[in-house]
Amino acid sequence: MMAGECKEYLFKVLVIGENGVGKTCIIRRYAHQLFSENYRVTIGVDFSLKVINWDSSTSVRLQLWDIAGQERFGNMTRVYYKGAVGAFVVFDLTRAYTFEAVTKWKEDLDCKVKLPDGRPIPTVLLANKCDQKNKYTDFFLDNFCQEAGFLGWFNTSAKENINVEKAGQFLVERILENT
Ligand code: GTP
Ligand code: MG
């Protein structure tokens, strides 16, 4: 690269998963360093921007699409997913059925959005509310991710600020590999 040359990327990243798993809280933590216990259900979709000075010559703008859990039963996900280059699928460690729904979210994602070369977009699994419960073994989640096509997983807590930044870094690294 020539001296002084700077790269600026804009990446659309989806955050999906069942109602109340903590998608909005994770995004608020990641983009704004805020957390609140008050649950306000997301209607449709919300957006946040996270700007990352990746290195001395690279800046990354993440456009985070916070998609309401109930949208899995709607017809809009194809529209929302369009142009995304990465995704987080979130479940709630305190509610088993939210983990069971992960596969459905992943399948919905993979059949509606792909990278330009046809590969699935890089996707990371987030086991949220790890401040409350930690019920799945590393071995189990490693295997699950391999079978379901996730690049990896993190135990996260939006509340206690555990691994949110780390998961973001991990996904951005994978996205940059595709540029
Ligand atoms: P929808 O918008 O309905 O799809 O839900 P969501 O996935 O956006 O969930 P939201 O972020 O609104 O969080 C739901 C509830 O879980 C809120 O009451 C949060 O305070 C709580 N919550 C979110 N993250 C955490 C966490 O890491 N730990 C704990 N203990 N509670 C959390
Ligand atoms: Mg929400």
Image: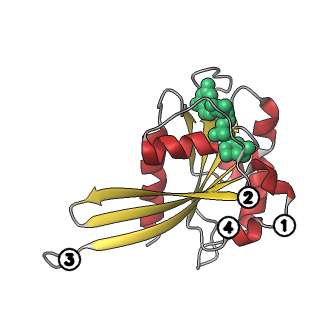
Labels 4 and 2 touching (C-beta < 8 A): no
Q: Can residue 129 be seen in this snapshot? A: no
Give the distance between the C-alpha atoms of the residues marked 1 and 3, in whole angstroms: 43 Å
**Viewed as shown, does residue 165 lie left or right of 139?**
left
Give the distance between the C-alpha atoms of the residues marked 4 and 3, in whole angstroms: 31 Å
Q: Percent from the top left, x then y, of residue 85?
A: 55, 67
For label 1, being within 8 Å of ligand 1 is answered no
Tell which circle, 1 or 2, labels the residue nearer the N-terminal end: 2
Label 4 crowd bin: few (<14), some (14–19), many (20+), radius 10 Å: many
Q: Quadrant of residue 84?
A: bottom right
Q: Percent from the top left, x then y, of residue 120?
A: 64, 66
Tell which circle, 1 or 3, labels the residue nearer the N-terminal end: 3
Tell which circle, 4 or 2, labels the residue nearer the N-terminal end: 2
Labels 2 and 3 touching (C-beta < 8 A): no
**Viewed as shown, does residue 89 lie left or right of 27?**
right
Element at badge 1? loop
* Numbered label tally: 4
Element at badge 2? loop
- Between 41 and 62, which is closer to the camera in this rendering? 41
Q: Which residue is mark 1?
A: 75
Q: Which residue is mark 2?
A: 44
Q: Quadrant of residue 113?
A: bottom right
Check the picture and name the quadrant holding the C terminus. bottom left
Q: Which residue is mark 3?
A: 5
